[in-house]
Each structure stands twice: as C-alpha cells, then as structure tokens.
Image (spheres, rainbow, N blue to C red):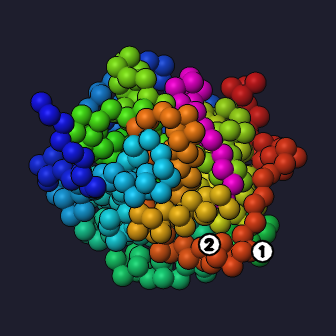
C-alpha cells in the first residue's frame, strides 16, 4: 500500500478517543517500591489511603496487574469537549532547523485550563462525585492544575478549595479569576486556615509559600472536613494512568500513517504528562517490541532525576503525606528565587523514578535561558505560545533534531507539548527584557535539601 502523505495535523475521530487507560504499572516487570505509612514505616494499605483520596483512585493506585482499565463513559463525555487533541507534524520547525529528522508533537493546550492536567482532573472529579463526596481540596503552584480541577468540579457539581502558592497567586491574579469563574474558592498558601499553614507562617512570616506547603494545607483540610477528599495533579500512579490518554492517542495517530518513532521526549515536573505520553510506547519497549529512546527533561535549577537521591521521602514539606520511593532533592528543597520556568517539585513520580533507575529512559537538565530561547523560537515558527514547562521538551527536541542535521540521521522524534504560556508572561517578560538569569544549585545547596530526607532504615 502506498504511504499516505503525513498532514500537518493528524486528528482522530471522537470514536477514537481511548476507551481504556494504559496502566504502566502492569507493564513493568519490576514494580516501584510501595508507598510507606510514615507512622509505621509499613507499606500503605488501601485503608491508609482512603481517608485522603477517593476510593476508586486508591483502587487504581494499587492496581499492578490490569494493563488496561476502562474509562467510564461519563469521563469520555467530558473528554469529548476537548479531545482528541491534535498530533502535529512540525514541518515548519523541521524546515527552519534544516534537519532530516521528523518532529511530531502532541498538543495538550487546546482547552481553557491550557494544559494536559484536565485529563486527570476530569477523572478524579468524576470519581469523587460517584462516591457521593461534597467537596475536594487541592494545591496549585503555577495554577494550571487548580484551573483544570475547577473546570472538572464545576462540570460534575463538586465544591473545590484550592490552596495556591502565595507568590503565584500574587503574580497570576487572572489565573485565580479563572478558577473563581468556575466556582472554586482560592486561598493563598501558607494560610491561617490550617495547622500546617499557621506553623509555617509562624516560622517564616514573609514566605511566598511552596508547593509542598500548599499540599500540606490541602491534605489537612481534606482529612479534617466532612465528605471531602484531597486530589493531586501529578506524581501518583493513578494520575499517570489518566494521562495515558496522551500516549494512546499519539500512538493511534502515528499508527494511521505507519510512523514508528525513535525518540520520545517530555518535560518532567512530577512526571505525569511524561508518564502518560510514554505509557504505551514504554510498555512495548519493556515487552521487547521497540527500542525507543525516552528522554525526560527537567530544569537545571530543580534537577530531581539528574542530581537527586533515589530514596524514600515525603511528598510534601510538612511531612504529613505517605513516603514515596523516588528521585528527590529532599522535601525541604526550594528552587532558587530566580527560577521562572515551572517544574519546581522536589520529587518525581515513583513510576518514572523506577523506569529511570532501571535504565529504561534517560534524563536531561536544561537551563532556563535555553528553555525560553527554544520557547520563543517555537512560538515564532510553529505559532503556538508554549508553556515554560513544555518548552523544556521543545529545547531537547530541537537539540536532538540539530544532532540529526549534523549526523544525517533521519530520526523520528515525538515530544509532548503540554500547554500554552498565556499566564506565564511575567517569565517571558524577564526573557524579553534580558533580565532572566540561570542558577544551577551547588552541591552545598543540594545538601541542604537532602538533609530534609527522613532518616529511616529503608534509606540506609
Ligand atoms: C503541570 C505542568 C507540567 C508538569 O507536570 P507533570 O506532572 O510533570 O506533567 C508540565 N507542563 C504543563 C503545561 C503543566 O501545567
């Protein structure tokens, strides 16, 4: 059969939205280490997790055996509002780079929240509603997750409290208004509404807050309120599961044109978009069906994979969450104040951490000025104004394509374009003004974060 020419955008039909998610846990021969209850240091049982997360999500979190998990029809209906998302052949970028490589990107910014986070927000809000809960809480840093969850909660009729990192809520007042428009209550964190917040305010009165602190507040609020649970936008296995729609749709679109990619690239914050994008491709790699190179890209100023330790650590800075075995900079780590490019979480998804530990993927750390250089180039050539987070993946995709120009290799590169950057114009302004600086933490800086890692027998 003659090969069809590949269009700029490969769209799927509504019918082709996946009917099942792909559970990478089931595909992995060696599973990641279990979460530990910090009080007993024993593996968390479902009963340990159910006061915090909704029941169906706990079930998915613990599921190590079902490779495919059905997507409820109600969630598919929500997905139909903004999915399938386009898979784009970056013909314009290829031309400017004068590369023999083929570059593809999966664009997840085509919804009001502006990022892939809606894929899991939709699922988690649905399961909370199904369980009969009245409300959920969460934290948000840059604001994409809070926005996505606001949209999902308004669709399913749930109340939502968002603890937003204080500096972000000041820098991004319009993000806050989007969330409020969708009915969420937004509280700058640290706040005086929780024990954890009050404690941090007392210790560091002028603090602008951190993601870890906001998580602590949101978890505390959920477990001390009636008919309320906490939802998390990244890191956990069930979030990666929901994000597998990205990878499944990408694969279905590429399969239509018989494209077999050589390299898959994604940015890594907590690891959810990357874990979702690579899921079916990685499953095939583990089964010996391909030899794809997977690259996770992180900021040089928050280098959890490339410079972190693979140990048990808390998921939040107040040390109230379960312990996860992951690559971490220490739950007390905070990136330097000049860091503007997102992806500032101290740890990494246990699944992604385990894949990295097993050598099934590699990681690259990039400096933010290089990231924004790539962002600007991409905006001008491909037309989409990318989120700074996504631009980490763009940077490395461009670098890989340039290597192909130099070596003559005709690699097929797929990367995840996780979102748009309209709410990140303060960071773009720094770049445009020439005031953006890079700071790579010294070993002494990192040592301070490592000191916050719990001293438990499992970490010896
Ligand atoms: C949140 C976010 C990320 C990083 O989160 P992951 O869980 O690592 O995917 C990347 N890109 C965008 C646009 C985001 O909003």
Precedes in sequence: disc 1 or disc 2:
1
Magenta-colored span: 348-368
Instruction: Please give the name of the residue rendered at 53% of the width and 64% of the height, measured from the top-left corner.
Output: 377
Above or below, 208 relative to 335? below
Instruction: Please give the name of the residue rendered at 78% of the width and 58% of the height, measured from the top-left corner.
Output: 439
On the image, which quarter does residue 250 sit in?
Answer: top left
Q: Nearer the viewer, residue 87 or 82?
A: 87
**In this picture, residue 61 sits left or right of residue 8:** right
Q: Which residue is mark 1?
A: 205
SS for callout 2: helix
Q: Nearer the viewer, residue 324 or 90?
A: 90
User: Within 10 angstroms of label 1, few (less than 14), some, or many (20 or more) residues?
Assistant: few
- Quick one: quadrant of the C terminus? top right
Q: Which mark is residue 168?
A: none
Q: Nearer the viewer, residue 74 or 446?
A: 446
**In this picture, residue 417 sits left or right of residue 221:** left
């Amino acid at each position: 059969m003659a090969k069809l020419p590949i269009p700029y955008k490969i769209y799927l039909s509504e019918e082709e939205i996946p009917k099942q998610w792909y559970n990478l846990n089931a595909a992995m021969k060696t599973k990641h280490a279990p979460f530990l209850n910090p009080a007993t240091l024993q593996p968390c049982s479902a009963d340990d997790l159910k006061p915090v997360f909704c029941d169906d999500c706990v079930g998915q979190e613990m599921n190590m055996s079902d490779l495919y998990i059905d997507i409820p029809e109600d969630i598919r209906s929500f997905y139909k509002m903004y999915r399938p998302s386009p898979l784009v052949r970056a013909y314009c970028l290829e031309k400017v780079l004068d590369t023999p490589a083929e570059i593809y990107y999966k664009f997840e910014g085509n919804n009001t929240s502006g990022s892939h986070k809606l894929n899991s927000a939709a699922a988690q809000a649905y399961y909370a509603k199904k369980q009969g809960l009245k409300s959920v809480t969460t934290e948000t840093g840059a604001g994409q997750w809070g926005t996505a969850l606001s949209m999902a909660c308004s669709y399913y009729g749930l109340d939502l409290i968002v603890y937003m990192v204080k500096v972000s809520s000041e820098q991004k007042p319009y993000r806050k208004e989007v969330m409020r428009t969708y009915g969420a209550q937004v509280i700058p964190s640290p706040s005086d509404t929780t024990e954890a917040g009050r404690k941090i305010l007392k210790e560091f009165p002028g603090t602008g807050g951190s993601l870890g602190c906001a998580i602590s507040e949101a978890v505390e609020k959920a477990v001390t309120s009636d008919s309320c649970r906490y939802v998390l936008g990244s890191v956990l296995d069930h979030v990666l599961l929901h994000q597998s729609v990205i990878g499944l749709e990408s694969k279905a679109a590429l399969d239509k044109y018989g494209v077999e990619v050589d390299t898959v690239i994604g940015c890594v914050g907590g690891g959810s978009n990357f874990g979702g994008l690579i899921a079916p491709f990685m499953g095939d790699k583990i089964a010996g069906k391909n030899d794809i190179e997977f690259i996770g890209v992180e900021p040089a100023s928050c280098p959890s994979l490339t410079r972190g330790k693979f140990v048990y650590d808390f998921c939040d800075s107040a040390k109230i969450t379960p312990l996860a075995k992951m690559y971490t900079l220490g739950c007390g780590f905070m990136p330097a104040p000049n860091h503007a490019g997102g992806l500032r979480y101290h740890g990494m998804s246990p699944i992604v951490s385990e894949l990295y530990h097993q050598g099934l993927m590699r990681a690259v750390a990039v400096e933010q000025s290089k990231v924004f250089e790539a962002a600007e180039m991409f905006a001008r050539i491909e037309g989409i104004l990318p989120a700074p987070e996504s631009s980490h993946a763009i940077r490395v995709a461009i670098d890989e394509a340039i290597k192909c120009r130099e070596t003559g290799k005709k690699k097929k590169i797929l990367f995840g374009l996780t979102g748009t950057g309209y709410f990140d114009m303060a960071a773009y302004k720094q770049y445009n003004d020439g005031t953006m600086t890079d700071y790579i933490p010294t070993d002494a800086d990192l040592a301070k974060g490592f000191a916050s890692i719990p001293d438990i027998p499992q970490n010896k």
